[in-house]
Image: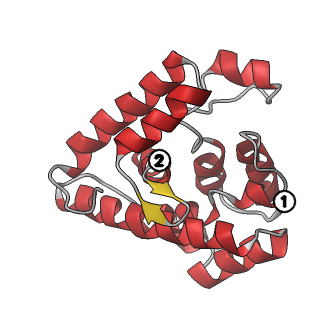
């Protein structure tokens, strides 16, 4: 899989060419750093993780923010990634990284194409989770993210974030990279 992925430099170029502002680039770089640490922790515990996919998926997860800063940036980003000819696993990370994933009925209400928007693979889960632990370019505890989302999202969406958190703890164990 990794041989089809763009390089880190190419991914950053895609972000800039798409129109992502510098603050978005700083955010994705911080998410990428954490996601790579989480992926390495998973790998050390025996989980099969494509480290390069995590890196490139994390770098590109917010490419849709070049078009919108709403929840719709996930779908916009997936469309941009498709137009760039990026591999399906990267597109999948981009469209599944918001919240703890978007349930089918919520996606339908949002007017999104029928698809799966909840992270399924370990790489999708790592990037989604790392994104929940970075605000701007600073690492924050999951409790802070949940506190913010409780004000904005339905309870079922917040519960998906907690479920992702619990699952990630089983993958990474006592990883000192967690804020």
Q: Provide the residue designation for mark 2.
A: 132
The spot of residue 90 in percent (x, y) is 61, 56
The spot of residue 140 in percent (x, y) is 39, 54
Question: Does residue 139 sit above or below 11 in this rendering?
Answer: above
Q: What kind of element bears circle 2?
A: helix
Q: What kind of element bears circle 1?
A: helix
Question: Does residue 50 sit above or below 7 in this rendering?
Answer: above
Earlier-in-chain disc, 2 versus 1: 1
Which residue corresponds to the image point at 28% horizontal and 56% vertical from the top-left?
A: 178
Residue 57 visible at all: yes
Mark nearest the camera among 2 and 1 is 2
4 left or right of 30? right
Q: Provide the residue designation for mark 1.
A: 83
Q: Residue furthest bottom?
A: 9
The spot of residue 31 in percent (x, y) is 49, 63
Question: Does residue 149 sit above or below 87 in this rendering?
Answer: above
């Amino acid at each position: 899989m990794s041989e089809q992925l763009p390089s880190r430099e190419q991914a950053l170029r895609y972000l800039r060419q798409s129109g992502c502002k510098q603050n978005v680039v700083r955010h994705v770089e911080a998410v990428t750093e954490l996601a790579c640490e989480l992926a390495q922790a998973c790998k050390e515990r025996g989980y099969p993780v494509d480290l390069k996919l995590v890196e490139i998926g994390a770098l590109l997860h917010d490419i849709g923010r070049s078009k919108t800063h709403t929840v719709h940036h996930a779908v916009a980003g997936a469309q941009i990634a498709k137009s760039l000819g990026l591999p399906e696993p990267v597109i999948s990370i981009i469209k599944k990284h918001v919240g703890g994933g978007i349930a089918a009925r919520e996606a339908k209400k949002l007017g999104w194409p029928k698809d799966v928007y909840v992270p399924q693979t370990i790489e999708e889960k790592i990037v989604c989770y790392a994104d929940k632990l970075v605000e701007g370019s600073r690492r924050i505890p999951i409790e802070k993210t949940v506190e913010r989302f409780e004000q904005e999202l339905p309870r079922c969406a917040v519960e998906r974030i907690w479920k992702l958190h619990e699952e990630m703890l089983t993958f990474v164990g006592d990883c000192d990279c967690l804020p």
